[in-house]
């Protein structure tokens, strides 16, 4: 069968989890297909009845990141109610609240049958290890990825047995109301920026451009604060100063562990 990894993952933690789940699920004859929705693409994708989908989305404000919600609409099961899906959310060691339930509802709306699910921990977008403020730094680590492979392997067993029981994941309806978005955007230190354009290329909402002087600038309107530009700037020239870094470091540094739903 074909295993489709469907993810929106600006800082790559969700992608790592989806890959580990797929590695645990796959057997010799299976093929893997990446449906990377991190950058806008616009084209529709269909998953065939005999195949399987693995979804991965980041948690933003206790919910599925809004851009992921929009982009997952591009993916459908060819035959509704037949194709199984493994659902994963990745959160920055605070909490995932209603995100997994929301992802399950999205998958069902797109015609999939939820097979299993997991909530995993990834380094928080606002983690600043170099400034002595790490939040889940280095995660998902080897232990997290082993849990994700286990989710994949256990899902395979469940799938082989057939007629899975309806899945129950943690979460509430109505979903958590989102708070206001932080009124700021990552900024560039012009002394460090080399104008290489990496940030503009990887920005999931394409809101970074280069000035005539060759310095990266973000448009606040469309910025989702994912911090991909901060994490992956080769010159370390991007910064996002938010009071959340200190708050999260102070209150949510105690290690949380993945939760699996089978
Ligand atoms: C705008 C925003 C909101 C976030 N909200 C939460 C949250 O509610 N709970 C949490 O634990 N982590 C939260 N995070 C952290 C991300 O869920 C975490 O860094 C995740 O690993 C990012 O996934 P990715 O690497 O696939 O992009 C938030 C991050 C951003 C940018």
Image (cartoon, rainbow, N blue to C red):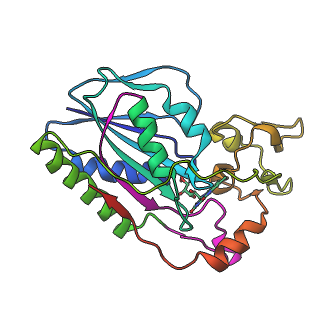
How many labels, in total? 0
Q: Can residue 11 be seen in this view?
A: no
Q: Is residue 147 visible?
A: yes
Percent x, y of residue 122: 50, 61
Q: Considering the image in quadrants, where does the N terminus appear?
A: top left
Farthest residue in the left direction? 161
Query: Is the residue 61 above or below the residue 22 in the image?
Result: below
Q: Is residue 127 magenta?
A: yes
In the displayed structure image, the side of residue 163 where residue 80 appears, left or right = right
Corner quadrant of residue 182: bottom right
Nearer to us in this view, 133 or 249: 249
Q: What stretch is highlighted in magenta?
A: 110-138
Corner quadrant of residue 130: bottom right
Farthest residue in the front direction? 174
Query: Is the residue 226 above or below the residue 52 in the image?
Result: below
The residue under the point 46% across, 20% down is 44
Farthest residue in the right direction? 213
The residue under the point 66% across, 71% down is 248
Query: Is the residue 18 above or below the residue 76 in the image?
Result: below
Percent x, y of residue 145: 35, 61
Nearer to us in this view, 148 or 106: 106
The residue under the point 72% across, 43% down is 196
In the displayed structure image, the side of residue 65 where residue 25 appears, left or right = left
Q: Is residue 204 magenta?
A: no
Percent x, y of residue 166: 27, 45
Corner quadrant of residue 169: bottom left
Percent x, y of residue 126: 66, 63
Nearer to us in this view, 210 or 3: 3
The residue under the point 61% across, 41% down is 66
Nearer to us in this view, 241 or 49: 49
In the displayed structure image, the side of residue 64 where residue 28 appears, left or right = left
Instruction: For ligand 1, give the image quadrant.
Output: bottom right
């Amino acid at each position: 069968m074909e295993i489709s990894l469907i993810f929106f993952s600006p800082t790559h933690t969700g992608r790592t989890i989806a890959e580990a789940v797929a590695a645990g699920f796959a057997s010799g004859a299976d093929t893997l297909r990446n449906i990377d929705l991190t950058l806008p693409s616009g084209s529709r994708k269909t998953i065939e009845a005999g195949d399987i989908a693995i979804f991965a989305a980041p948690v933003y404000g206790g919910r599925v990141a809004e851009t992921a919600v929009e982009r997952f609409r591009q993916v459908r099961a060819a035959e509704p109610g037949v194709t199984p899906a493994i659902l994963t959310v990745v959160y920055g060691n605070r909490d995932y609240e209603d995100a997994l339930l929301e992802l399950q509802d999205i998958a069902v709306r797109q015609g999939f049958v939820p097979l299993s699910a997991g909530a995993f921990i990834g380094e928080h977008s606002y983690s600043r290890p170099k400034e002595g403020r790490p939040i889940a730094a280095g995660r998902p680590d080897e232990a997290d990825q082993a849990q994700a492979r286990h989710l994949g392997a256990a899902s395979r067993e469940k799938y082989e047995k057939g007629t899975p029981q309806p899945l129950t994941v943690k979460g509430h309806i109505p979903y958590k109301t989102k708070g206001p978005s932080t009124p700021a955007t990552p900024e560039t230190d012009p002394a460090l920026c080399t104008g290489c354009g990496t940030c503009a290329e990887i920005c999931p909402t394409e809101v970074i451009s280069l000035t005539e002087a060759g310095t990266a600038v973000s448009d606040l309107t469309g910025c989702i604060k994912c911090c991909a530009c901060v994490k992956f700037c080769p010159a370390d020239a991007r910064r996002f100063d938010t009071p959340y870094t200190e708050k999260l470091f102070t209150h949510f540094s105690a290690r949380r562990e993945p939760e699996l739903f089978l």
